[in-house]
Amino acid sequence: MKKFIICAFCALCGFTTASAQKFGHLDTQSIIQSMPEYTAATTELEKLAKQYEDDQKAMQDEMQKKVAAYEKEAETLPKNIKDRREQELNELYTRLQESVKSNQTAFQQAQQEKLQAIHAKLLDAIKAVGQEGGYVYIMEMGAGIPYISTTLSTDVTAQVKAKLGLK
């Protein structure tokens, strides 16, 4: 009988501890999109992408002009000049391809750096809300979790926005 009472007491204590746990959920995408840092980063990244696009277009235009000029006079050129021009066109094409790769890498790096700072700030705010509210878990709504009970879990999106100074 004593064992039964002790087991029942332990089970009851475990149940009350488990039921006292707090869970939260949030929509980080809506938070990030409302951050002024995100808007500024997006604007800067769009400008950077435009610069890379303009650079690439200028190189493509130069390539097209040189190819057109070469094709126009290729029949009348001596073999050594023809070979030299073909070599120049090949080098220009290689530079164009390398420029495209370099620009893509630089853009991805800039994008990662800008977004990393935003995500770090968001993560700090989520941690603060979690600690202040005594939450065991705060889950992302769009993280592929098939179901989150909104009756057993609290939406902390507004609290995180407030912690970030957002409306």
Image (cartoon, helix red, strand yellow):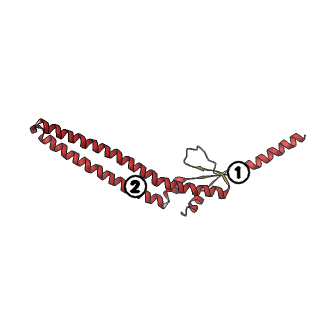
Q: Which quadrant does the N terminus fall into?
A: top right
Residue at image coords 16%, 37%: 83
Q: Quadrant of residue 84?
A: top left
Residue at image coords 66%, 59%: 132
Q: Is residue 153 left or right of residue 28?
A: right
Give residue 84's mark.
Answer: none
Disc 2 to disc 1, C-alpha distance: 42 Å
**Helix or strand or loop: what does disc 1 sit on?**
loop
**Helix or strand or loop: what does disc 2 sit on?**
helix
Give residue 45's mark.
Answer: 2
Q: Nearer the N terminus, badge 2 or badge 1?
A: 1
Name the residue type under label 2: Leu
Q: Whole-percent x and y of residue 28?
A: 54, 53
Depicted 94 relative to depicted 137: above or below: above
Q: Whole-percent x and y of residue 123?
A: 56, 54
Q: Is residue 68 left or right of residue 23?
A: left
Which residue is tagged 1? 21
Q: As drawn, which residue projects farthest toward the top?
A: 79
Q: Which quadrant does the C terminus fall into?
A: bottom right
